[in-house]
Amino acid sequence: MSGYWQMRSAIARLALLGALWILAAAAWAAPRIGVATMQPGEVFFERFGHNAIIVVDPASGDAISYNFGFFDPSEADFVGNFARGHMMYYLVALPFEQDLAQYRDSGRGVSIQWLDVGPDQAQALADTLAERARPENARYRYDYFTSNCSTQVRDALDAALGGALKSQLSGRSRGNTFRSEAVRLASPATWMWLGFDVGLGPSADKPMSRWEEGYVPMRLADSLREAKNAAGRPLVQSEMQLLPHRIAPEPAETPRRWWPWLLAGVVIAALVAGTGRRSPRVIAAVALPLWLLCFVAGALLVYLWGFTDHWAAWANRNLLLFNPLCVLLVPGAIAVLRRRNPPVWFGWLTVAIAAGALVAWFLHWLPLRLQYNQAWIALMTPIHLALAYVFMPRRLSR
């Protein structure tokens, strides 16, 4: 009989230990990690899409969105800091359902990728994000291409994976560049893609690795689908659509051709040269706003290169096509409009500006760092040459 009671006591102790083990396991269960990807919106700062890291608490089931995309326009000198490339962004932790509400209201699609990461990695990532979201740690220096909401998500995941994500993505490339992706995503807004295409220099035309491509949230989601975890299994365990996309879809990749721009430039140049023989005043009326536009664009390029931290705009050869010295031609154009002879240097300056455009064309074919500005060379060079032909000193003196 004593053996029976001893057996019952042992079973009871084992049951108690089992219950305690289950409770301890529940208390120490790893959080669930996901990456939410939001499709592009219609406001200019929404054009590139967005993403966030989602952490689901194993005990409560609450989902927290760690969102790196917040900024404060009420900060002192906000516009000036933005122009100089000194923008500060914030990491904010908020309930995922609250974060989803704005995308539901604006019709932007949202999907989530649940990641297959180890318990220690998941917990370390959750702890790191919680610490970074504290007000004293939340700010980070924003860069459009190398330190934005998506690269912060990418870097946080890579740190939790011990550098495995970067090692898988760094040696691969699809040939995309910072320029090609920026222009593609900005294409629905004409002023925006023009700004990127004219304003970016040769540094934006280096083919990106899949790692660098992660500055675009949708590209990062593509790369995560192909990545592996430490056990060699797919990093993305499952994927689901949370909200449908009800507005214009992400722009597709389309090849950029320069010959239509050359055709337009040659046609305009022929009209300028032909009309200028009979009526230089008409050409002066057309050239005046063009030269003012070149001055404004060129002055902005000089500012971006010389006075800001926007590294992707440095050494921009479009300065030779949108030459800020064109402002010096304005008085001469006004003189021609008033049937007066402009200064002699006016004609020679048009020749110098046309020569600068030819230099841009020449540099494009040298084995230097490529700048993808063939379209602007093809458009502007014939026009500058035609204007130089019309306003040469010997022609104006006739």
Image (cartoon, rainbow, N blue to C red):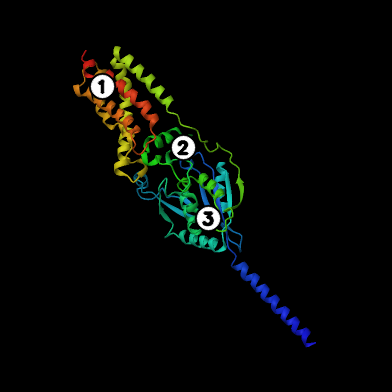
Residue 186 - label: 2
Q: Mark 2 and mark 1 in contact (Cβ < 8 Å)? A: no
Q: Residue at x 35, y 40 (%)?
A: 313
Disc 3 + disc 2, Cβ < 8 Å: no
Residue 321 visible, this orientation: no
In the image, residue 51 above or below residue 364: below
User: Mark 1 or 2, which is nearer the eye?
Assistant: 2
Q: Dot 1 corresponds to which residue?
A: 334
Residue 334, position in %: x, y? 26, 21
Q: Quadrant of the C terminus?
A: top left
Give the amino acid at mark 2: Ala
Look at label 3 and name its amino acid: Leu
Work out which residue is located at the far left of the displayed protein and give it.
344
**First in residue order: circle 3 vs circle 1:** 3
N-terminal-most mark, 3 or 2: 3
- Label 3 sits on residue: 94
In percent of width and height, residue 279 lies at 29, 13
Is any atom of residue 365 visible in this view? yes
Q: Is residue 290 left or right of residue 181?
A: left
Q: Indicate the secondary structure of the residue bearing disc 2.
A: helix
Q: Residues within 10 Å of mark 1 (few under 14, many from 20)?
A: some
- Kind of residue sitting beneath label 1: Ile
- Which secondary structure, mark 1? helix
The answer to the question of whether label 3 and label 1 lie on touching residues, with beta carbons closer than 8 A, is no
For numbered disc 3, what is the local secondary structure?
strand
Q: Residue at x 62, y 67 (%)?
A: 26
Which percent across, then down, holds residue 99?
54, 51
Q: What distance separates the C-alpha of mark 3 from that of mark 2?
A: 29 Å
The residue carrying pointer 3 sits among few (fewer than 14), some (14 to 19) or many (20 or more) residues within 10 Å by Cα, namely some
